[in-house]
Image (tube, grey):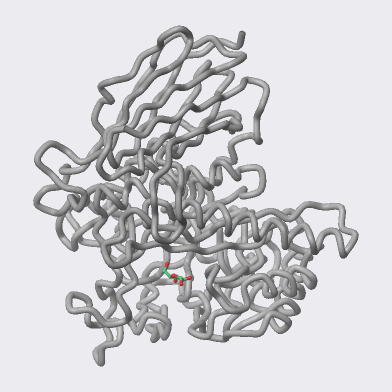
Amino acid sequence: MPYATITIDRDFTVADVPRRLFGSFVEHMGRCVYTGIYEPGHPRADERGFRQDVMELVKEMGPTVIRYPGGNFVSGYRWEDGVGPQEDRPVRIDGAWHSIETNAFGLHEFVDWAREAEVEIMEAINLGTRGVEAARSLVEYANHPGGTYWSDLRRKNGAEDPFDIKLWCLGNELDGPWQIGHKTAAEYGRLAQESAKAMKLVDPTIELVAVGSSNRQMPTFGSWEHTVLTHTYEEVDYVSMHAYYQEHDGDAASFLAEGVDMDAFIDGVISTIDAVKAAGKHTKQVNISFDEWNVWYQRGLETEDQPHQVARDWKTHPRLIEDTYSVTDAVVVGTLLHSLLRHGDRVRIANQAQLVNVIAPIRSEEGGPAWRQASFWPFARMAALARGQIMQLSLVSDQVSTKKFGEVDAVDAAATWDEERGKLALFVANRSLEEDGEVSLKLPGFTARSIASAEVLCVPEGGDRHLANVEDNQDAVTLVPLQEVGIQDGRVQLKLPALSWAVVEIDVESA
Ligand code: AHR
């Protein structure tokens, strides 16, 4: 049975919990917008076409910030197509996803939706086919109070007050040859620098994210960030990271350890940022926006169930990459969130990709129901309970063997301390596929009073690790009370089922 000791000392904190770490992503892709968050005529849609069944699940999941409108989509997008009277908006080809974009949903609709969902907007601009002029016009349209061409057009289109969007992505994945308007690092670095300058001349209060590598395997990873930041360091606040993980050839052990890869990837990008900072004698600190991450089974562009990705026909909202997430996937999602939280001093924004239907924790059917995937739960609980300070962990764990990473800790964790509420939250996973685990939590500087709540996501009785929530069995995988947890001699002791993710809230006093 894997055994782990975790020590959390009251005096050793990492940083305040960046609330933007619990972000998500809505792209005009597949059925994320159309028949996801927006479906006029659906029995649960309001007069604006916003699906209220989906809205309720979004609010329950609790994302804090949502990136929009892409993704690869944004690199061919004209934002002007999505504003003004709906009947006048042009129908366009979306080259990124071989789809038809009706533009029925655009910036005003997203702002209204985001206000209702109580999320901050993170707006991406098109630096694939467009550039400085379109970028600064969009900032003026969105954020300038009025009395100018673009701000008055916004008012004419029904929004008297500025949208006041603070967070902006300077394009998407422009290092990738698949990207419309793909660029070299130097080409992108210069364009991003000039776009950033022009955008900040319109609104100096905005925060900007430069595009980093599309993934750690990109041949240009490292040099891309170095070149881009050398051009943009003074103008931007963040550099982006993207990573998707999947189980290969039934190797669940390696898959469950992908948090190790995420840790190393983040550490690598931090090193590059700081090298550029030192070489350029900069004093400000650029941080990380991990604005796409998730489990994604990348089965190539054409699959049996989703043939239209490279199809000859053009559809308005084809089914694209609608992955179904199992218990195993949910545990991995939990560990990826641990990695992001442990790095919360430098990863200040993160967006799970995406929100609905497209590799998403929420699924919906056209005219039908909406439900939570297994991966919904770790996100929802961490978004709700990770408050206050991120705590440094000293974790000594028995090991599990993996093909990809060698020996790794069987137990993986992250923790936060909310001094105001007197609550310590421990997020913890058991990566062992066969054996239950035991965790002993030492809390120097704290007095543990009681267990406020304890829940676990694991393989239910009679199920297996591939069990998932589907339309006709929507709650097969859910959180259940963690049975064996208690306080003995000032230590919190808990038993974790094999292959599980758990959250334990402890009432603590500062000793
Ligand atoms: O999230 C799906 C796609 O993955 C995004 O459009 C793109 O940025 C990434 O490659």
Identify the residue shown where x is 73% and y is 70%: 226
Displayed quadrant of residue 455:
top left
Q: Is residue 327 above or below residue 208?
A: above
Residue at 31% x, 52% y is 329
Q: Nearer the viewer, residue 487 or 152?
A: 487
Q: Image height check: is 45 above or below 72?
A: above
Instruction: Give the camera-side residue of 91 and 180.
Output: 180
Query: Residue 110, image x and y in percent?
Result: 44, 59
Q: Position of residue 483 (x, y in %)?
A: 25, 22
Q: Is residue 270 visible?
A: yes
Up-down relation of residue 90 to residue 473 (above or below): below
Total numbered circles: 0
Locate residue 182, reporting x and y percent. Answer: 58, 85
Judge from the rendering whether residue 366 lies leftward or rightward of residue 445; answer left or right.
left
Quadrant where the image shows the N terminus? top left
Q: Residue at x 74, y 55 (%)?
A: 286
Residue 318, position as x, y percentages in the image = 26, 75
Seen in the picture, residue 190 relative to 289 is either above or below; the reply is: below
Front residue of this view, candidates 154 and 281: 281
Image quadrant, ligand 1: bottom left
**Can residue 162 be seen by looking at this rendering?**
no
Q: Quadrant of residue 9?
A: top right
The answer to which quarter of the image holds residue 443 is top right
The foreground one among 197 and 487 is 487
Q: Quadrant of the C terminus?
A: top right
Residue at point 30%, 75% (across, down): 299
Tell me: 216 left or right of 336: right
Extreme-bottom residue of the structure: 312
Residue at far right of view: 281
